[in-house]
Image (cartoon, rainbow, N blue to C red):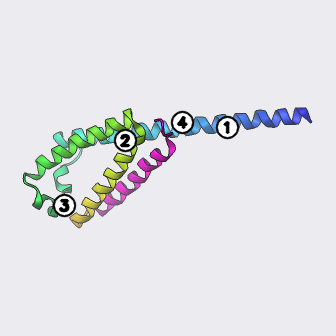
Amino acid sequence: MDTLAATTATRTNREEGTTTSRLHTVTTLLKYTYGLVPIVAGLDKFTHLLTNWDKYLAPVVADILPFQAHTFMSIIGVIEIIAGFLVLVKPKIGSLVVALWLVGIAINLLLTGQYFDVAVRDVVMAIGAFSLYLLLDHKD
């Protein structure tokens, strides 16, 4: 009976270690994804290598701006870079900021009357960022 209990305890400890290792791997992947992607997207707001970001600004938003859409998108780029670094340095708060930011982007995209596919993708990404928030300990 003692051998069975010891074997069961060893198996349980090994399974817990594997689960902990998997959670750490998933958390790390999400942290770097939601840290680096906003940084890259933010930097690209200045170069437009990936796309012309200005076209994604809803006309209703552009109409109320006191400056050009391109200037606004440059400001957005700086905010995205900061949000990405925040995920890397303070992932608990950063992941929540990025999740909310992505929801805001999705709402803006819906207001364009087009880019619905990108809006849906941003909502899915927001869910991923929020999942990272839920996975992290409060001390992170």
Residue 58, numbered label: 3
| Inter-mark Cα distance, 3 to 1 | 48 Å
User: Amino acid under label 2?
Assistant: Gly
Give the magenta-colored segment's residue range: 116-140
Name of the residue lying farthest toward the left: 67
Decide: few, some or many residues near mark 2? Use Cα within 10 Å; few <14, some 14-19, many ≥20: many
Residue 53: image location, x then y, percent: 19, 50
Alpha carbon separation for disc pair 2 and 3: 25 Å
Task: Tell which tag, 1 or 2, sits nearer the viewer.
Answer: 2
Three-letter amino acid code of the residue under disc 1: Glu
What residue did someone put label 1 on?
16
The percent coordinates of residue 136 (x first, y second) are 49, 41
For the point 92% across and 36% down, which residue is it? 1
- Using the image as rendered, state which of residue 123 and residue 134 is in the foreground: 134
Q: Are marks 1 and 2 in contact (CB under 8 Å)?
A: no
Main secondary structure found in the magenta portion: helix
